[in-house]
Image: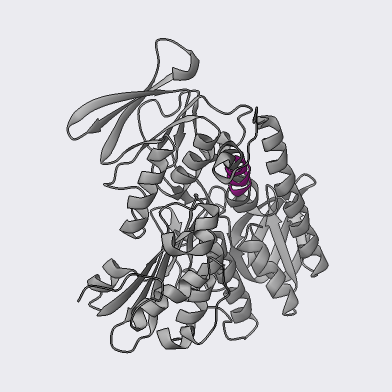
Amino acid sequence: MEREFDLIVIGAGPGGYVAAIKAAKLGMRVAVLENREPGGTCLNRGCIPAKAMLHASGLYREMKEAERFGIFAENVSFDYGKILAYKEATSAQLREGVAQLIKANGAELIYGTGTIVSKGVVKAVTKDGEELLKAKNILIATGSRPLRLPIPGIELPGVVTSDELFQLTEAPERLLIIGGGVIGVEFATVFSALGTKVTIVEALPRILANLDKDFAQNLKLILKKRGVEIVTGARVKSLSAAETGGAGGLVCTFEEKEEEKQVSAQYVLSAVGRVPETAGLFGEGFSLSMERGRILVDENYQTSEEGIYAIGDVTGGIQLAHAASAQGVVVAESLAGHMPSVRTDLVPSCVYTEPEIASIGINEGEAKEQGIEVSCGKFMMGANGKSLISKEERGFIKVIADAKTGRVLGAQMMCARATDMIGEFGTAIANELTVGDMLLAMRAHPTYNEAVGEALEELAGGSIHSMPRKK
C-alpha cells in the first residue's frame, strides 16, 4: 500500500508539528509520523514538565518564606506524588491539544516510526504493520536525546538523565548534578526548593558558560544562598556504588585544581547536554551528509539530498523548542513559495530559574570579539518598585547598542518575568530599532517592564532612578 503527500514530517515535536500545521494551512497535503507522544521532548520530557515542577517547587519555597511579607503559615509541606500528577496533567492537556490541532488543520498524524528508504519515500511502521508513504518533500524533526558521558559507572542504578529524573516517585534526599548548564541549574532550583541537598559539578570555569558572565556570577550566589553546592572547573573521573546505602548510595569522584575529591548522593543526574536522535531514521543504502551525529543543512534547512529538510535539535544547532518551531514555519513557507515570516537567527535564550534569565542578540563580550563598538545601559532591579514589592534577588537588565548609530544589538535580563519581556528586544533587533525608537513607548508603573525603559535611558544619557555616573 502506498499513499502520496506533498510533505511528510518525521517527528511531532515543536518543530515537526508546527511545520506540519503551517504547511497544511498553506494548502499542502501533510502526514506527520511520531513514534512516541505528540509534542516531542519539550512537551513530554523537557520544558513543559520542568517548568511545571519549577512552578510547584517555587510556590512551596514562597510559602515557607512568606513571613517576609507578614504572612505566617504553619506545617507547610508538599506531596511529591501530587506534584508529579500536576506535571503529568499539564503535559497531557497540551499533548491532546497538539494532536487535535494537527487533525483540525487537515494534516494526518500517524503513530509509528518513519524510516527514509530513498528520496521521497518513507516507510512507516505502525502497530498495524508497514506502509510506504511518498512525498515531494520530507522534513526531519526527530529532535534529540540526553547525552551520557563515557564515565566509569555511568550505567549504575541511580545515575539518571532528565528523562528518568521525571519518573522518580519521591524527591531525592541528595542529588548530584553533572553539568551546570540550563538543565542542571533548573533542576537544582527545583529540588533545592523541595529540601534536597544538591551539588553541581561543572567542568567549565563557571555555570551557564555559554551565556553572559553576569548571569553566572549572580545565579551562583543565589543558588549557594539556597543551599546548593557548586563546584566549577572540575572533571568527573568516575561514579561508584557507596559501601553503605541510603541517601549516599552513589559516590562521584572528581578532580578540582589537581586535587581528587568525592561527593556522595542518592541519585546522580547527567545533565551535560543532548545529542541528535537519528536512530532508525535511514534505511539500508540511504544516508545524508552528517557530522558528529548531526544532519548537515544549508541556510534553507535542506540536507545534502534535494527535497529532504531537517530542523531543530537533529541538526545540532541551538537546541530550543521555539527555534525549532520557527525553522519549521520557514521551511513550510519556503515550500509553499512564500517569503519567511520570522528570522531564525534571532533566538531568545531563556533559563527558568528564580529569578528568570533571558537574552537575545549579542552581549558585551561577543561585541568585542566581533570588533563592534558598543554602549551598554544597565539597570539594577533593586531600584525597581515591583522587584522590591516581591523581594526579588540580584536582578538586572542590560541593553547593548551600537555606539555610533544607537541601534539595539542585544539584551540580557535577570529578573522576574524576564522570559516574557525579552520578546520586546527581539522585535526591536529584528526591526533595527534604535534606543530612541524604543524609548518612544511609555511603560506602565509599577511593573518589572519599566526597568527596560530605565536601562534604555541609561544609554540615552542617564536613568532617572539610578545614581548619577561618576564623571
In the picture, the quarter occupied by the C terminus is bottom left
Q: Is residue 58 magenta?
A: yes
- Looking at this rendering, what residue extends furthest in the left direction? 258
Q: What residue is at 28 percent from the left and 73 percent from the top?
A: 367
Residue 257 quadrant: top left
Task: Left or right? Give the position of 459 relative to 334.
Answer: left
Locate residue 429, reporting x and y percent: 45, 80
Answer yes or no: is residue 28 visible: no
Q: Position of 468 compared to 41: left or right?
A: left
Residue 350 position in % (x across, y down): 49, 59
- Tell me if 205 is positioned left or right of 313 in this view: left
Question: What is the x, y in percent for residue 188?
Answer: 47, 39
Q: Which residues are magenta?
A: 51-59
Q: Position of residue 223 (x, y in %)?
A: 41, 42
Position of the N terminus, as image quadrant, is bottom right
Q: Residue at x 44, y 45 (%)?
A: 185
In reply to whether residue 147 is colored magenta, the answer given is no
Residue 268 vertical position relative to residue 45 in the rendered view, above or below? above
169 versus 99 height, above or below: above
Please tell me which residue is depicted at 41% across the width and 36% down the height of the picture. 228
Magenta stretch: dominant secondary structure: helix
Task: Tell which of 184 and 142 is nearer to you.
Answer: 184
Asked whether 409 or 457 is in front, the reply is: 457
Which of the 4 image quadrants contains residue 197? top left
Q: Report which quarter residue 115 is drawn in.
A: bottom right
The colouring scheme, among rainbow, by chain, secondary structure or one colour, is one colour
